Image (cartoon, rainbow, N blue to C red):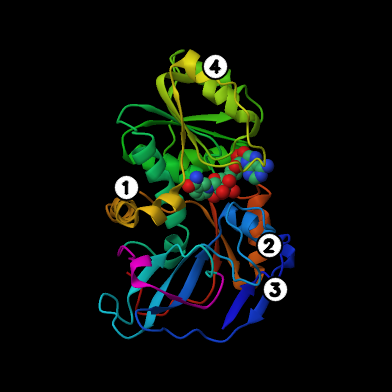
Amino acid sequence: MRAIVCREYGPPSALVLSELPDPQPGPGQVLVRIHAAGVNFVDALLIGGSYQIRIPPPFVPGGDCAGTVIATGAGVTDFAAGDRVLVSPGIGAYAELITLAPVQLARMPANMDFAGAAVFLQANATAYFALVNRGTLKADETLLVLGAAGGTGAAAIQVGKALGARVIAAASSAAKLEACRALGADVLIDYASQDLRAELKAATGGRGVDLVFDPVGGALAEPALRSCAENGRYLVIGFASGEIPKLPFNLPLLKSCQVVGVDWGGFARRHPEAGRAVTDAVLALYAQGRLSDPPLAHYPLERTAEAIADLAARRIAGKCVIDVAPEPSGHRP
Ligand SMILES: NC(=O)c1ccc[n+]([C@@H]2O[C@H](COP(=O)([O-])OP(=O)(O)OC[C@H]3O[C@@H](n4cnc5c(N)ncnc54)[C@H](OP(=O)(O)O)[C@@H]3O)[C@@H](O)[C@H]2O)c1
């Protein structure tokens, strides 16, 4: 099979398109032909050796994909050849084939295609877990999403709207904010040209926001935390800016708010059943038509490095999807 290999830690340009032996499903395993893979910010960290989990090279990166089951090993009863599945394997998705345990797989809703499925799980499960399990978002609360045109941000806009929140989307350009509007955001703030704190004050009548979803960190963190309403919650998602903010400890006291850490991957590993409930919940929202695909930038497998570089350099509104292999006829909903 063709696969993208990280032979040593480095930038995306160091990734190599290689021929690897086709994997075979062992007992209790499922073999999936990958049709599309989703690009995540964390891919750049993993191949650079700067993620909190270090995977020794060589390895095939790629944390999200969707495809068709083509074979099952002994003892597999819950999936069969032809099933359309999506999965967040963590690594291994930038390849034509992957073997997995059935428990890792979810079935694609009938209204989802492979490209939409490939970019769905990590972003939407993170957003739902953050907003519901960690942030206890209630209908009619005000949600601020930073990096709102990014992968987790775009998902947070849509999940927030589906849960009945008023969503303020903040991003760095007019084009990115237009994408946020199309995803359902109620208020748009350009933090590259506008004062985030003053705009949030104006948008909330001085009250502040109930929940902050922050995958960016850096210089945005303190004005966003200072903009929390009483009993507000500030969700620490990630640090796409490259800077882990250092916040004055008196702020949660003065604002009567909470700073809440979010680790979707760790939670799903430690609590697989509760993690599955999150995955089922977001897939149900998609099946009901209450979530939709973000804008997608398509790349073939051989241009995976370019896709990761474009995402890491803030050039993308929405998600990058790798078209690994054409969708087989007869499997489309
Ligand atoms: N805690 C968890 O469970 C969890 C789960 C998934 C991901 N994450 C983390 O969340 C972060 C974001 O992931 P994502 O998939 O949403 O990433 P993404 O699709 O790349 O979006 C990140 C956004 O951050 C903004 N940004 C600001 N400064 C940036 C910079 N210097 N470089 C790149 N982007 C910058 C960009 O928007 P603007 O240009 O509009 O500012 C970009 O759209 C990552 O750190 C990732 O590891 C955490």
Mark 4 or mark 3, which is nearer the start of the sequence? 3
Q: Which of marks 1 and 2 is in front?
A: 2
Rate crowding at label 4 as few (under 14), some (14 to 19) or many (20 or more) other CA atoms within 10 Å.
few
Give yes or no for residue 102 being in the magenta stretch.
Answer: yes
Q: How many labels does the image show?
A: 4
Is residue 234 something that shows in the picture? yes
Rendered residue at 32%/86% (across/down): 74
Q: Do labels 2 and 4 touch, CB within 8 Å? A: no
Circles 3, 4 touching at the beta carbon (< 8 Å): no
Residue at (54, 54) in percent of width and height:
319
**Do the residues bearing badges 3 and 2 touch, measured as CB atoms within 8 Å?**
no
Residue depth check, mark 2 versus mark 4: number of the one nearer the observer: 4
Residue appearing at x 65%, y 51% in the figure:
312
Q: What residue is shown with label 1? A: 290
Between the C-alphas of marks 3 and 1, the distance is: 38 Å
What is the quadrant of the C terminus in the image? bottom left
Q: Where residue 235 sits: x, y (%)? A: 47, 34
Residue labelled with disc 3: 16
Q: Reply yes or no: does residue 283 show up in magenta.
A: no
Query: In the image, what residue type sits under mark 3?
Result: Val
Tell me if mark 1 has few (under 14), some (14-19) or many (20+) residues whose alpha carbon lies within 10 angstroms of its own.
Answer: some
Choose top left, top right, bottom left or bottom right for residue 85: bottom left
Above or below — where is 249 with respect to 263?
A: above
Report the residue at 53% width, 18% height from top. Answer: 251
Q: Give the range drawn in magenta.
A: 94-110
Q: Give 158 or 57, whichever is nearer the viewer.
A: 57
